[in-house]
Structures are given as structure tokens and as C-alpha cells.
Image (spheres, rainbow, N blue to C red):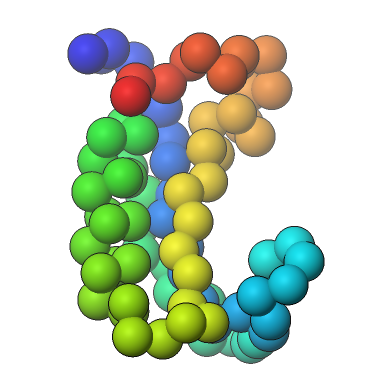
Amino acid sequence: MSDKQLLHLVIGGEMKTLDGPPEFRDLGKVDLVGAYPSYREALGAWRSKAQETVDNALMRYFIIHAHRLLDPGLGADDHED
């Protein structure tokens, strides 16, 4: 496990449709679950929220690798699994 902090955001919300790229039904209702220092912690939060909303087929949660947005020089291998 790396000591390097790699910012990951977990967000979710109801989608307009299940076809095509993700598009939220209402941006004002996007659920910002939190910011996490590792992929492993973000994945745990994502799983929890996904399980809570399993009955709503239009609800989706995502992990955003924010560290890659902040430092585009980071490669795809710069995260822990």
C-alpha cells in the first residue's frame, strides 16, 4: 500500500436514462458522498452507496480519480487496487 495520498471522489445520483453516457437527472440533487485518500477507501464508500440504492435502477454512483485531474502527469498505474 502506498503512503502517497491520491484523491478520489465518490458521487452519485439518478440518471436521465440508462442509454448513452451518464447524465444526471438533476445536478442539484447529486450526492457528493465524500473525498477519499485511496482507491480502496473510495471503493468501500461506492459499494455502500450502491447497495443502499440497489432498488432504484436509475441511481448510479461513480469513483472519480480526482488526483489525475489535479496532476495529469500521473499515469493509470498511480493508484492502489
Residue 27 is at least partly visible in this image: no
Q: Position of residue 62 (x, y in %)?
A: 49, 56
Q: Please tell me whether residue 23 is drawn above or below residue 68 in the rendered image.
A: below
Please name whichever residue, 59 or 3, is drawn nearer the observer in this view of the structure.
59
Relative vertical location of residue 64 with respect to residue 52 in this rendering, above or below: above
Residue at x 32%, y 45% (from the top left corner) = 42
Residue 80 lies, with reference to residue 60, above or below; the image says above
Name the residue at 33% across, 67% down.
50
Quadrant where the image shows the N terminus: top left
Q: Total number of numbered labels?
A: 0
Q: Position of residue 5 (x, y in %)?
A: 35, 24
Q: Is residue 58 left or right of residue 45?
A: right
Image quadrant containing the C terminus:
top left
Query: Picture quarter containing residue 21?
Result: bottom right
| Residue situated in front as seen by the camera: 61 or 54 | 54
Q: Is residue 9 left or right of residue 43?
A: right
- Side (left or right) of 7 relative to 70: left
Q: Position of residue 36 (x, y in %)?
A: 32, 43
| Residue located at (43% from left, 35% from top) | 7
Rendered residue at 32%/32% (across/down)? 38
Question: In the image as oriented, which residue stretches furthest toward the right?
Answer: 20
Q: Residue 32, position in %: x, y?
A: 43, 67
- Asked whether residue 9 is in view, the answer is yes
